[in-house]
Image: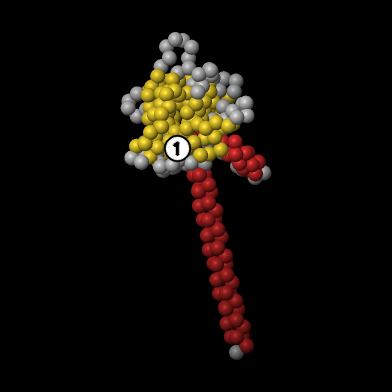
Amino acid sequence: MAVICLLVSAGWQVAAQEAADAAKVERTEEAEKGENTAATETSGADKPAQDESGEESAEPSVEEAADPPTEDEEAEEKKEARQAEEAAKVARPVSSDPVQIYGWREWVTITNGDDQELRLQAKLDTGARTSSIHTAEKELFERDGKKWVRFVVEDTAENGDRQRMRMEAPLVRIARIKSPGGESETREVVRLKFLIGERRLKVDFTLNNRKNMLSPVLLGRRTISVLGWVDPTRAFLAETNEMR
């Protein structure tokens, strides 16, 4: 009888140990599944968003508002700098995905949605937060209860053959920018489509007077962060598709 009791007790101990081992394996598999899901979600967040037309966007999606907000560029830059400092404290894995290299100056093609386009030189400037484009004859108006801007995009080239293209776009917001002289000024911000190399993007541009600048278009770091890397020693690399 004692032998039978010992055998029954040993059998219960083996069964209990097997159940515990099975539960441990199940918890491990669930944890690994959760880690893989988190990794997939994180890697997907780093990719630029694309709309149905395949255009990449460096900007969050917005709805056309009857009264677009006013944004202080200097305050946003300070906020961005603080976020960058905090991000620098956290080690991030280096991606093995190829990244395209661009020069400090590139050709871009702006389209107005009416089968018209204008090829302009753009300066890639990591010191600027928001992209900017040279415009003239700006006019605010309303369409279906929303604020829009009518303007003319101009080439600032000094070759005597300045190209112009009339455009209309919804007003995204008003940017308050401090000029080099310390004075604050406001600029309209619209979202425009453009082509650089083989990439089609849709980003925010401030409508600015750049007639004294060499390039009528400036691409800021919000756009550059979607494009790739910039080589400050070379220019016009977009069409070469050089990768690193």
User: Is 82 located above or below residue 130 in the figure?
Assistant: below
Residue plotted at (37% across, 24% down)? 166
Say which residue appears at 50% left-offset and 19% top-offset: 211
Q: From the viewer's side, name the closer residue of 64 and 199.
A: 64
Coloring applied to the structure: secondary structure
Q: Is 90 left or right of 241, judged from the image as shown?
A: right
Instruction: State the image coordinates of residue 79 (x, y, percent, origin top left).
Output: 61, 41
Work out whether residue 90 or residue 97 is closer to the camera in this orientation and state it: 90
Can residue 183 be seen from the camera position used here?
Answer: yes
Of 135 and 223, the residue lying toward us: 135
Quadrant where the image shows the C terminus: top right
Does any portion of residue 242 appear in the rendered image?
no
Image side of residue 11 versus residue 65, left or right = right
- 178 above or below 89? above
Q: Position of residue 58 (x, y in %)?
A: 48, 36
Asked where in the image residue 137 lies, by quadrant, the reply is top left
Judge whether 83 appears above or below 19 on screen: above
Q: Is residue 83 left or right of residue 195?
A: right
Quick one: SS at disc 1? Answer: strand
Counting labels gives 1
Residue depicted at 48% across the width and 12% down the height: 158
The residue most toward the right is 89
The quadrant of the rendering that contains the N terminus is bottom right
**Residue at the image position 59 percent from the left and 85 percent from the top:** 4
Return the residue at label 1.
Answer: 172
Which quadrant holds residue 89?
top right
Q: Amino acid at mark 1?
A: Val
- Mark 1, Cα crowd under 10 Å, few <14 / some 14-19 / many 20+, is many
